[in-house]
Structure formats: C-alpha cells, structure tokens
Image: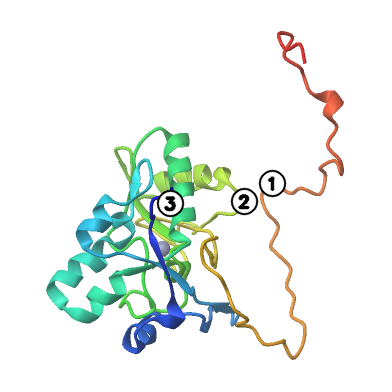
Amino acid sequence: MEAEAGLKVVDGFGLEPDLRALLRPGQVVEDKQGRGHRLPRYFYEVPTPEAAADIRLTPHFGLNEFLLVDLKEARTRGASFRSTSRNIPCAVRVLAFYLERLREVIGAPVQLAVNGGYRSPAHKLALGTSPHMWATAADLFRVGSTVLRDQTSIETYNRVVEEISDDIWVMPYGHELGHADDHIHLDLGYLNVVPREIGEDAMEAPQAKPRFAFEERRSGDRRGWPKTPDFTQLTLDPRSKE
Ligand SMILES: [Zn+2]
C-alpha cells in the first residue's frame, strides 16, 4: 500500500525563472552585522488559498496563518503575488511546532499579526534580511485576551517565550530599530529545512578559508551539566517490577 501523499516539497532551483528571481533560493544575503545567510531552497507548494486554510501544521496552526496577507494581496494584486504566496519554506513546520508549544504553556490562543509570518524576499515588508524570509519568525499581536502593545505585556510574554527553548530569540521591547513596541517578534534564526523525502546535490563549493563564529551565551548555560548522565539518581516508580 502506498503512503498517503502529504504536502508537496519543491526544490527552488527548479522553479520558473520569474518565481525563482522573487524567492532567490540558495542565495546568500547579509544581515545587518554583515553575516551571510543562505535563503531557503526547499518549499511547500500550496495549490490554492483555500487549500492553505485546510492544511494544519499542528492542532492549532494552519498553513494559511503564515501566509495570510500574501494570500489576500494575491486576490487583488495579480499574478506575481499569487505565485510567491504559493511557496513557503519548509521550516514553517518547525515554527508552528514552537508556537503550538507556546500555546500549550500559556493555555490560551496565540495570534499572529497581519504580515506576521512568512515574507518572501520580494515582499514589500521584507526590507533587510530577517528570519521572516525563512518562515522561522512570527510576530504575535495577541495572547489570549491580551493585546501586546505595552511594555508590561510584551516583556512578560517575551520571558515566557524565552523559557520555551534556547532555540528561540525574542526582540526586546523598545521604540528603536531592532526593538518592538506593538508586537512580540520571535524567531528560530536562519533555519533551512530539508524534508527527508527530497534528495540534495552538491550545492556548496569548498570555501576559500575556514569560517567560524562563537554563539552568544544561551540562557540555559550548559557548561555545568554532568558529562555523562547519572541514572542512579533517578527515582524509580515503586510499582514497576522491571
Ligand atoms: Zn518580526
């Protein structure tokens, strides 16, 4: 018996030239610090806006929530927006997983802002390199019944988001560039996902000189952790006979 077909994964290198020019798969773009990041190469192809509404990534997040405004614009603006909104980087599934986890921890719905999900490199709001172009960033405007537009609510929930995982970065509260004062921005960085169903070829040429960088310290600094787990310290369930 054949497995039921899931989402279609496309290699951006195989897209039509005009669409490829908009999505720029595999191209290296620089962030504000001058660090290069390779744009996503593998995308989920969404056949229609209606289909996007039906595709669930997790129990509470549909694919359409990450594409919402692109799809609305697609109806009024014509073909080029329609075609960019049909493809979303595969990392969106990982983002949805973390948002689902956040929803679970908070115990209330977590709502994305308008334009708060994926922004293709051609999107008017994708000015400058941001993880939104990887579909690994979300802007939240509401959590439960709390609208996130003051320092207390943003900083309170920023702490909750940070506690979920060291993989997540949240934008600090503030009015300057690189800060947020009317939403929560969270992201997983420049994460490229290659679904297990697709094969890869040799895209990378050998580097002229080795590159390295040091990570910023994470909140859960692991240096003090034991090298090998000590299972003798575990409390065993007395009902277990094994
Ligand atoms: Zn953002």
Judged left or right of residue 30, residue 61 is left
Q: Quadrant of residue 30?
A: bottom right
Going by the numbered disc 3, the residue's amino acid type is Glu
Q: Which residue is mark 2?
A: 166
Residue highlighted by disc 3: 2
Q: Nearer the viewer, residue 101 or 83?
A: 83
Q: Which residue shows up at 51% across the image and 84% down it? A: 27
Choose mark 3 or mark 2, whichever is in front.
3
Q: Earlier in the sequence, mark 1 or mark 2?
A: 2
23 versus 181 height, above or below: below
- In contact (CB < 8 Å): disc 1 and disc 2: yes
**Crowdedness near tag 1: few (<14), some (14–19) or many (≥20) residues, C-alpha within 10 Å:** few
State the residue at coordinates (86%, 25%): 232
Please state which of the two labelled residues, at mark 1 or mark 3, is closer to the viewer. Answer: 3
The answer as to whether callout 2 falls within 8 Å of ligand 1 is no
Q: Nearer the viewer, residue 87 or 77?
A: 87
Would residue 103 be found to the left or right of residue 68 on screen? right
173 relative position to 110: left or right: right
Name the residue: 52% across, 67% down.
Answer: 198
Vertical placement of residue 197 versus 10, above or below: above
How far is disc 1 from disc 2 in space, using C-alphas? 7 Å
Residue 187 appears in view? yes
Percent coordinates x, y for residue 15 in the rendering: 38, 81
* Of callouts 3 and 2, the N-terminal one: 3
From the image, tell me which residue sits under label 1.
220
Whole-Å distance between the Cαs marked 1 and 3? 44 Å
Identity of the residue furthest to the left in this view: 76
**Label 1 sits on what residue type?**
Gly
SS label for mark 2: loop
